[in-house]
Amino acid sequence: MTTKPTARKFRIRRTSPATAATSSEGQASRGASANDPQEAPARPASESNAALELDAIRREGLTGRQLRMARRIAQKHGLAPTSDYDAVRLLRGRGIDPFQRSNMLELVVPASERSDVGDGRIQLPQTLPKPRETLPSTHLSPADQRNRQISEIQQDIARRRRRKLRMLMLRLAAFVFLPTLIAGWYFFAFATPMYATKSEFLILQADSQGGSGGLGGLLSGTQFATSQDSIAVQSYLQSKDAMLRLDGDVGFKSHFTQESIDPIQRLTPNPNNEEAYAVYRKRVKVGYDPTEGVLRMEVIAADPMVSAEFSQALINYAEERVNKLSEQKRGDQMDDAKASFENAAAERRAAQEALVTLQIQGETLDPEAVIASIRSQINTVELQLLEKELQLAALLDNARPNQSRVDGARGDIRRLNEQLSELNAKMTDASQGENSLAQLSVRIQMAQADLATRDMLLQSALQQMEQTRMEANRQVRYLTTSVQPVPPQQASYPRAFENTILAFLIFAGIYLMISLTASILREQVTS
């Protein structure tokens, strides 16, 4: 078995540029002569020795980076290895350590700056045969082709990303940043300052003069007792009726059509009610807090004094509205109570007139007393008649009665019978027939009962009217202003920074929604 040839030690010697060029030419000529098959020395080892050397190199555990470096160094020295391990073998066969730092630097150092590599001998120019063509092949290995394709794909992806990023920034600048800049310029430099006057008022109920039962008594004195009135006042202050009244009294339209107000906030000349009402809804804000029962109002105008004047006028309108609401409620209740009382009084009067009419028709005020008197007379006559008959019977029992006394007794009996017949006839007339005293008495009794009923109804209606008057007094509403309108000294609107941020968020949201919609539609179309 032949021994492995030892590699010659060499060192890099730094010389002048001319000497370096001469050394480079000599090394190139030596490399060319070494690659020439006619001049290359015979290999000391056979093919089996080469295989053993390759196995030994594989067992060294070289990394992929070292193997690639060895191939590049072998190609630089004009060798044609069949594999990376063969490149290490060929370089070591020529006495070159592929993993030495100086050899690695030779890959990046230009040929004009590299120093001679030799054994210290002076290399003189020699006549060399024409070297063969040693340019690298245009055919790359599959790994290099894959690396090259991956590099091209990565470059293309990076180029597309840069282009998309530029387009994104252009779109953001056109659709988000530029509109936000315009909005900020308007809010900071162009918008007319507006002054807001704030006021607070609440609606109170009159103190009740006595405890009233039920749920109404529990809620009286709380904010829930006047919540409906507060909501009604809030609706009125935000209505077109209040706007028209404010314009007629103070001049709402004329104030917001001034030339000093910027065109965006200014009303057009001679605006209609709808345009003015739209501005009124923006400039007059009324809120109701149900937990506290407080109405909060904010009036915005271009002048602080005008803003306070508008606020005070609206408070006066609200107070009048509260008075009208409670007055109408109280008036309706009192009208019903008065109507009931007047009806009861009229019916009582009619019943009394009917009783008087019956008494006049019978020519007596008490038919029962008349009948009782007749009955008493009949009883008296019957008693007298009985006595006379007994007296006549006593006279006739004598053998020789006194004729004059008998005749007198008989005359008294005859007269008493006649009187009794007359009284019985009168009694019969009084108790029978349509116009009898009995019928008249029944009718008078019914009229008297009806009159008593009407008296009770009249008394009840009178009590109800008094109670209704008391309830109406308790239902009186009062509007109390807790915070008076004061003219502001500093403009409240526009809030430039907050409005600019809000505009940016709005434009960004719109752009985001449009971008997402376009992306979804593009994906649907392409799929």
Image: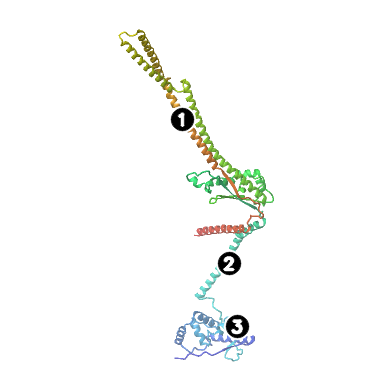
Residue ranking furthest to the right: 259
Residue 288 image offset from top left, x and y in percent: 56, 50
Task: Look at mark 3 in the image and give the residue it sits on.
Answer: 111
Nearer-the-camera pick, 53 or 409: 409
Helix, strand, or loop for circle 1?
helix
Foreground disc of the pair 2, 3 = 2
Which amino acid, mark 3?
Ala
Residue 459 image offset from top left, x and y in percent: 49, 34
Dot placed on the residue nearer the N-terminal end, 3 or 1: 3
Dot placed on the residue nearer the N-terminal end, 2 or 1: 2
Which amino acid, mark 1?
Ala
**Circle 2/circle 1 CB separation < 8 Å:** no
Please report the residue visible at 62 percent of the width from the left and 48 percent of the height from the top: 280
**Label placed on residue 246:** none
**Circle 2/circle 3 CB separation < 8 Å:** no
Nearer-the-camera pick, 427 or 336: 427
Residue 73 image offset from top left, x and y in percent: 54, 82
Q: Is residue 199 left or right of residue 217?
A: right
- The span from disc 3 to disc 1 (Cα, nearest Å) is 143 Å
Helix, strand, or loop for circle 2?
helix
Dot placed on the residue nearer the N-terminal end, 2 or 3: 3
Q: Quadrant of residue 157?
A: bottom right
Which amino acid, mark 2?
Arg
Q: Is residue 192 left or right of residue 389?
A: right
Q: Quadrant of residue 115?
A: bottom right
Q: Please, is residue 77 above or below residue 316 in the view?
A: below
- The span from disc 2 to disc 3 (Cα, nearest Å) is 38 Å
Foreground disc of the pair 2, 1 = 1
Task: Look at mark 2 in the image and give the residue it sits on.
Answer: 162
Task: Look at mark 1 in the image and give the residue it sits on.
Answer: 452
Task: Say few, some or many: other residues with alpha carbon within 10 Å of mark 2 (under 14 / 14 to 19 / 20 or more).
Answer: few
